[in-house]
Image (cartoon, rainbow, N blue to C red):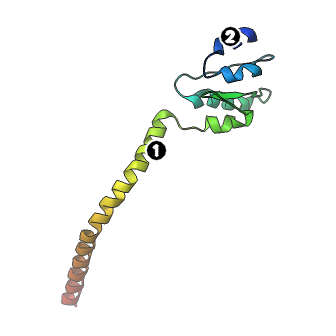
Amino acid sequence: MRVVRNTLARRAIEGTQFACMQQELVGPLVLAFSKDHPGAAARIIRDFIKDNEKLKVKALALENQLLPASGLATLANLPTRDEGIAQLMSVMKAPITKLVQTMAEPHAKLVRTIAAIRDAKEAAAAA
């Protein structure tokens, strides 16, 4: 964290994806940025607010869009890059898994039927 004047912060974000926030840079502020994941800074602020209720979110920016302060929870709950990839892979894998299960089911059913007949014959022979 660094202390900078709002005019300097306005110049710094000019021409970036955070330029939409220029009108919000008024009064004492804390600016939090995340390089790798957009939800990382939001998670840190959300966790800090739990213990320090005096901190108020004024604005959020994500990919050239100014978001309302109420969007903090939504932004903080975004999955990380690795979690997103894992979710995508599970969604992509599900149809293939279901296809393999469907194709294997007739054989499995045949094996279960033969095993049931065998068990019935063994039970009849033992009686």
Could you tell me which secondary element the residue under label 1 belongs to? helix
Is residue 5 at all visible to an observer of this figure?
no
Instruction: Kindly indicate the quadrant of the structure image that contains residue 32.
Output: top right
Spot occupied by residue 126 in the image (x, y as percentages of width and height) = 20, 87
Q: Quadrant of the N terminus?
A: top right
| Label 2 crowd (10 A; few <14 / some 14-19 / many >=20) | few
Q: Nearer the viewer, residue 32 or 55?
A: 32
Tag nearer the camera, 1 or 2: 2
71 shown above or below 45: below
**65 lies left or right of 121:** right
Q: Which residue is mark 1?
A: 87
24 shown above or below 68: above
Amino acid bearing label 2: Arg
Q: Residue furthest left?
A: 125
Instruction: Kindly indicate the quadrant of the structure image that contains residue 101.
Output: bottom left
Q: Nearer the viewer, residue 5 or 51?
A: 5
Q: Which residue is mark 2?
A: 11
Spot occupied by residue 17 in the image (x, y as percentages of width and height) = 61, 22
Q: Quadrant of the C terminus?
A: bottom left
